[in-house]
Image: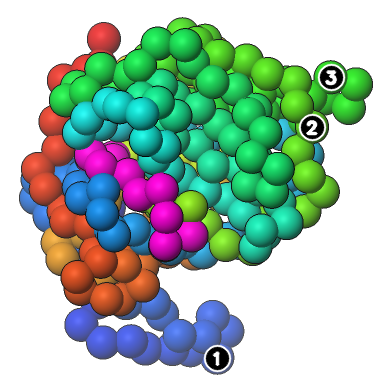
Amino acid sequence: MLALAACSAPSSDEDTGPIEVLPPDSAQDLSLAFDGSDDYASTGTAGFPFARLPQTVSFWLKAAASGGTEQTVITLRKDAESGVRVGLCGGALCAKSIYSRNVFAQATTPLPAGEWHHVAYQFDGSDDAPHHTIYLDGVSVATGTAIPEKRTPTSGFLGSTDGSELFFSGELDELRIWSVARNAQQIAAEIAGQAPEQEPPDLIAYYTFNELGGARVIDRSGRGNHALLGDGVSSRMPRRVLSGFAAGRP
């Protein structure tokens, strides 16, 4: 795991400017726990891909409960005009359009609650037949060919569509956003713990949630897309808890 050194105070020089102060990491592996009521985090969006270009979002997930409600794990959006949200629909994994609510891809079987699973949503950006795929533990469980809207995301959210609705209940860990369509072999390597922590320019956000405390979540990709828990409001911050996602690895 990428080591981030904590500095006691910011400094600067004429060539590089201010040196960013980063919070220290916990000695234990942590995940984020969302209460399903009002917890969320907002993210930076530097380098986020245009909606019709190739992209992949991957993460480890433990849903608290399945059911008929819709829950959002991650959203990449341009206001209400464009974007994708990945989460649960009726307990099953799904990816939907923010603008039209069209289904990009949706699994037919509910995700087992209380278990860690690896999830990846991939869009290949094909001009003639846009192709969306959802992988569960490295296996394709849903596909679709709907065409996304023409916008580049200007906001990102974890655990909600926009900090006000479709909240996620459960735990989230090791979330990555890529500006390429990752193939099945690359996704399998990530599940096995072999994904690179930095792979510029394709990896545009990577969150381990291992910060020792505070409202800030560090983007380990080097892009600076740090996240803010609850937009700084303590009652809306997901909690950092001990993670057990590695038990689901092959």
Q: Position of residue 45 (x, y in %)?
A: 58, 60
- Give the residues drawn in magenta, as a range: 162-173
Q: Quadrant of residue 65?
A: top left
Q: Position of residue 68 (x, y in %)?
A: 36, 29
- Above or below residue 74? Residue 89 is above
Please tell me which residue is depicted at 42% across the width and 43% down the height of the picture. Answer: 72
Q: Which mark is residue 14?
A: 1
Visible residue check, residue 109: yes
Q: CA distance from mark 1 to mark 3?
A: 50 Å
Kindly state the secondary structure of the residue where label 3 is placed: loop
Q: Is residue 51 magenta?
A: no
Closest to the camera, between mark 1 and mark 3, is: 3
Q: Position of residue 165 (x, y in %)?
A: 42, 55
Q: Which mark is residue 143?
A: none
The residue positioned farthest toward the right in the image shown: 128
| Image color mode | rainbow
Residue indicated by mark 3: 129
Kindly state the secondary structure of the residue where label 1 is placed: loop
Q: Amino acid at mark 2?
A: Ile
Confirm or deny contact between disc 1 and disc 2 (CB under 8 A): no
At label 3, counting other C-alpha atoms closer than 10 Å, the crowd grade (few under 14, some 14-19, many 20 or more) is: few
Q: Position of residue 142 (x, y in %)?
A: 55, 14
